[in-house]
Image (spheres, rainbow, N blue to C red):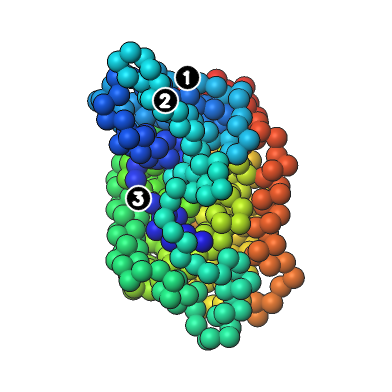
Amino acid sequence: MKSIKELYRIGTGPSSSHTMGPRKAAEIFLARHRHAASFKVTLYGSLAATGKGHMTDVAINDTLTPVAPVEIVWQPKVFLPFHPNAMTFAAFDARQKLLENWTVYSIGGGALAENNEEPTIESKEVYDMRSMTEILNWCERTGKSYWEYVKECEDEDIWDYLDVVWNTMKEAIRRGLEEEGVLPGPLNLRRKASTYYIKATGYKDSLKTRGLVFAYALAVSEENASGGKIVTAPTCGSCGVVPAVLYHLHKSRDFSDIRIIRALATAGLFGNIVKHNASISGAEVGCQGEVGVACAMASAAANQLFGGSPAQTEYAAEMGLEHHLGMTCDPVCGLVQIPCIERNAYAAARALDANIYSSFTDGIHRVSFDKVVQVMKQTGHDLPSLYKETSEGGLAKDYEQM
């Protein structure tokens, strides 16, 4: 498995697969063809179907047009076999001679891959164990925690990186709580985070707790929808869940920054397992791979903070993902707004419930986290394409694309 740095990417929204990935691909291609006279970019499948709502064309044009004119071709009905988020970059000289054709895939969370024997174009593998069962057994054998396994595998700078991640998450919440008005796009959706926050402070503890968690998740998700700076956890579309849970526990229970950062490491490990063994791409497996995985990550982080055993932490994460199985990715008008923002808030609350439920147990249960990951992958493959980030089915049906 890769470094969790590639799971926690710091960037701007609204979509890791449709905005961050294409922007990165354009930057890579541009570095090879800085003297090109023109470019042509063909977008396929889900990347084309919801690309305008996700600002895919804006990301590509912002990168390439300062050098040469860009033609973007949209092919929403053409799905290449390797992944639904495919794009082909072409560079031409002044005589319109083709310099290079490069097909690359945005596979979720801002990551890129090519369809060959070594598909990833990311960094080296850093984790030897590739299942949570293996890692759980290691924890029980050594007496160590999940974050200590991260420490053993990652470079020393991982804690500095996670510190930046944590500060970026906190800043996104603070900005989101202050902002008001309408989110960009044709839905005219009003920001709700500040209202939820104000209302929550007026309730007694039980309702106040839930309202604050909602407000924090909404704050980050609304920042993402506005193109603000956020952290993929594991994607842009699900970026509000983990920050909301950790920020709430940091504020309400006075957990130190170092303990929060260790919880982030554990959450990243669980997210990495899903990314490696299944997918975190809504275009490939639906929203279960985005919000469902975010809920699992937040559940694990919360359980560790409250002193859960490795088995209890694995159980919390398993519940967080299991109870999102089958969730479709159906963004209305191709925007990361409805139902995405609301789902972030609800999943954050679910993560806290998964932690509590697991804390009442001894951690022993029949269905492992690894089994749920396998089921999620198969469920995602069984879903028709109209339920996987094409905005052709589900809640998005009958709404026109941007």
Q: Residue at x 56, y 56 (%)?
A: 276
Q: Residue at x 33, y 13 (%)?
A: 95
Across and down, in percent, residue 93 comes to: 32, 19
Mark 2 lies on a secondary structure that is strand
Residue located beneath label 2 in the image: 90
Which callout, 2 or 3, points at the residue further toward the start of the chain?
3
Question: Is the residue marked by circle 3 packed among few (<14), some (14-19), or many (20+) residues within 10 Å?
Answer: many
Q: Quadrant of residue 155?
A: bottom left
Q: Position of residue 115 (x, y in %)?
A: 55, 41
Looking at the image, which residue is at 49% across and 49% down?
120
Residue 186 at x, y percent in the picture: 44, 23
| Residue annotated with mark 3 | 10
- Reading the image, the residue beneath label 1 is 73
Depth check: give the residue in front, 120 or 49. 120
Residue 206 shows up from this direction? no
User: Is the Cβ of the residue at disc 1 closer than 8 Å to that at disc 2?
Assistant: no
Q: Nearer the viewer, mark 2 or mark 3?
A: 2
